[in-house]
Image: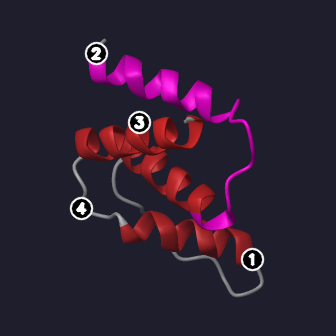
Amino acid sequence: MSNLKKKFEAAAADSKKLPERPSNDVLLQLYALYKQGSEGDVEGKRPGFTDMVGRAKYDAWAAVKGTDAEDAMQQYIDLVKSLKD
């Protein structure tokens, strides 16, 4: 396992132990970067208007579409680190 992947997984664990809950915008950014780093570009249809949470998550993930997995992992690590400080 690469060093970046280890840091990414450690950051994912740390994200669950933050001193305070981040804003919804930051949570969506964390979600999008995590999904992009772990699964790649978003696929499938955008959820309907009745699924507002699913739609927001889809839109956030779609916003980082095309980002290299390693770049997404590093951005995720940096964001979690900034939230811990």
Q: Are marks 2 and 4 in contact (CB under 8 Å)?
A: no
- Please tell me the numbered disc located at residue 3: 2
Q: Are marks 1 and 3 in contact (CB under 8 Å)?
A: no
State the residue position of label 3.
77
Main secondary structure of the magenta stretch: helix
- The nearer-to-camera label among 1 and 3 is 3
- The nearer-to-camera label among 2 and 4 is 2
State the residue position of label 4.
66
- The answer to whether residue 81 is seen in the rendering is yes
Distance from disc 2 to disc 4, alpha carbons, whole Å, reads 22 Å
Residue 69 in percent (x, y) is at 27, 43
Q: Earlier in the sequence, mark 4 or mark 3?
A: 4
Q: Residue at x 55, y 52 (%)?
A: 31
Residue 22 in percent (x, y) is at 67, 53
Q: Secondary structure at mark 4?
A: loop
Residue 16 in percent (x, y) is at 69, 33
Magenta segment, which residues? Answer: 3-25
- The nearer-to-camera label among 2 and 1 is 2
Q: Secondary structure at mark 1?
A: loop
Instruction: Mark 3: give few (<14), some (14-19) or many (20+) Cα within 10 Å.
Output: many
Distance from disc 1 to disc 3, alpha carbons, whole Å, reads 29 Å
Q: Residue at x 60, y 25 (%)?
A: 13
Instruction: Mark 4: give few (<14), some (14-19) or many (20+) Cα within 10 Å.
Output: few
In the image, taking residue 58 as reference, residue 5 lies left or right, namely left
Q: Earlier in the sequence, mark 2 or mark 1?
A: 2
- Please tell me the numbered disc located at residue 51: 1
Q: Quadrant of the C terminus?
A: top right
Distance from disc 2 to disc 1, alpha carbons, whole Å, reads 37 Å
Q: Earlier in the sequence, mark 1 or mark 3?
A: 1
Based on the displayed image, in which of its 4 quarters is residue 63 positioned?
Answer: bottom left
Q: Residue at x 60, y 67 (%)?
A: 25
